[in-house]
Image: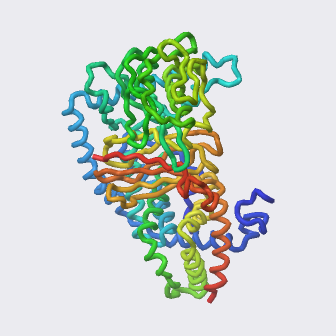
Amino acid sequence: MVSRPPGGAQGRDELPRDPDAALRVLYASHWGSMVRLASLLLGSTSAAEEVVQEAFVSTYRRWSRLQDPQAAGGYLRTCVVNGCRSWHRHQQVEIRHRRPGPPEPAGPAEVAAQRAEDAHVMAALRTLSPRQQEVLVLRYYADASEAEIAELCGISRGAVKSHAHRGLHALRGALAEVQP
Amino acid sequence: MTGRDDPFDPDRPTTDPTTDPVAAVLRAALLREADMVRPSDDGLDRITTRLDPRLDQDDRRSDRHDDGPGRRTWVAWAVGLAAAVVIGAVAGVLVLGGDEDDPGPAATGPTPSTSETASAPPSETTSPPSSTSATEVPDLEGVPVYWVGDSKANSWLYREFQTVPDTGGEVASAVSAVMSGAPLDPDHRTTWSPPARLEVTQDGDAITVDVSTDAFENPQVGSQEAVLAVQQVVWTATAAAGTPGPVTILVDGAPYDPWGTVALGEPMTRAPQVDVQAPIWIDSPVEGAELAAGPVTISGVSTAFEATISWELTTDDAEVVETGFAMGGANGVFDTYEFSTPELAPGTYTVTVWQEDASDGESPEGPRMFEEDRTFTVG
């Protein structure tokens, strides 16, 4: 069914002090959810995997300096969100010109219709600014609170509100405009 | 969540997906879209591959540390001393401020951010101040020294944690640095000239600084500059002593009016923080710091609209590597900020921090208000 989103409530599983062992535990518990989150932020699973690998590397390297190793999941997620933002910055021009259309419908009619509808929503989402996409994905997929989003994005809570507000507003407009 | 607390749309009193169709549609699409993602199963291998060359680098790095006699020891000393300075300062304030409403300005001096220095990456090293390293005098490390610096429309005090020659204790050495030393950041300066004679004495909280007249050789000091010069000494002495003061500056044992704008000889305390402390300063890294490869943590103290400051990291070719935001204190309350750069390849970098002008270009400070920068190398 639907994957469990990497929500605000971080799993506080016991993590080993040894960085190599901790890496394996973190990987087992976070690799899939982080790749999914990054895929939604980037619109590309291969780019997402690159970013998430790099996030694991940063977390590993910082291991001995993390004051609370049990918060490593949160640190990892921050690295993922930051990595996605950097990726966007370098790819902005390309993204702006790319509007992925709905994929070929396949399978039973309802599934195909659902896929087309989702692709339509995702295409509309991609027309928003990277920052608005980031805030909306964190809010509605990762279920992050306003305060968590502010921290993850390094912006004020006021800015989170305004990005979310404008993002939803723009999404509403884009959905109406791209309506088949 | 109802009414004006709603973060998203004043016209929609709730973000409940059942009543916000767009949010509901988006959430459902995101969840199904995420479920379509098939993360590859060789991620751990690829992460490990990425780690390998860096592990080698780290090993080489620690070898290098072992080569240099006591380089690590030096760092440990600096960190330990910085921490000791904070503890001293905090203890002083706690003891002395017991029956006062205002715990004294020392509380806002070294306290907030020396902890940043103490927690700086252990591989950080700093260049010794050029003007003082030639002497045989033992050095004090992590001493807070206040310098004058300029934003576009104003002059402020900027703090630097420095290694200074021990000229007779923390307070005397710090005050001596203000007059005879040099800032690490070339954008900072001092209004004082090196005096032939400087005596610093402490009697309880009270600090007396007695200098010879040659400390005032700098001509053409305007009134704002003169106030800042005096506050340089007051802030530095109180920070080093960990007391609220007062500080009395005497010239050859007597009152003096050096620049025609400030009368010395009376006990003085710190001017209000918002009047003299730079709205944004950088504590770590120090100018010219040589840091290990990897992400660099930048920290300092700021006050800004909605607490938000902006930052930009550039190479020595002025190419922008990364930009971002950080949160410090808000609207006249000073607090620490901290952010990390991405992994940095060896090279020289400059980090710039500022507050965005929220007034649509009305500010005399320009679009980047209270801009401050710091150059460091990553090895």
Question: How many numbered discs, if any?
Answer: 0
Q: Return the x and y of residue B239 as percentages of the image width and height.
A: 52, 25
Q: Nearer the viewer, residue B174 or B108?
A: B174
Q: Return the x and y of residue B6 as percentages of the image width and height.
A: 74, 60
Tell me what residue is drawn at x 51 percent, y 63 percent: A37
Res B27 visible: yes
Q: Nearer the viewer, residue B340 or B355?
A: B355
Q: Nearer the viewer, residue B151 or A148?
A: B151
| Image quarter of residue B244 | top right
| Image quarter of residue A131 | bottom right
Colouring scheme, one of rainbow, by chain, secondary structure, one colour: rainbow
Q: Nearer the viewer, residue B163 or A118?
A: B163
Vertical arrangement, residue B136 with respect to residue B220, above or below: above
Vertical arrangement, residue B78 with respect to residue A166, above or below: above
Tell me what residue is drawn at x 43 percent, y 18 percent: B212
| Image quarter of residue A63 | top left
Vertical arrangement, residue B253 with respect to residue B67, above or below: above
Res A73 visible: no
Tell me what residue is drawn at x 63 percent, y 86 percent: A179
Q: Return the x and y of residue B62 as percentages of the image width and height.
A: 25, 38
Is B113 on the left-hand or right-hand side of B182?
A: right
Tell me what residue is drawn at x 50 percent, y 22 percent: B237
Q: Which residue is situated farthest in the top direction here?
A: B203
Q: Return the x and y of residue B47 as percentages of the image width and height.
A: 34, 57
Is A34 on the left-hand or right-hand side of B361?
A: left
Quarter of the figure with the N terminus of chain B: bottom right
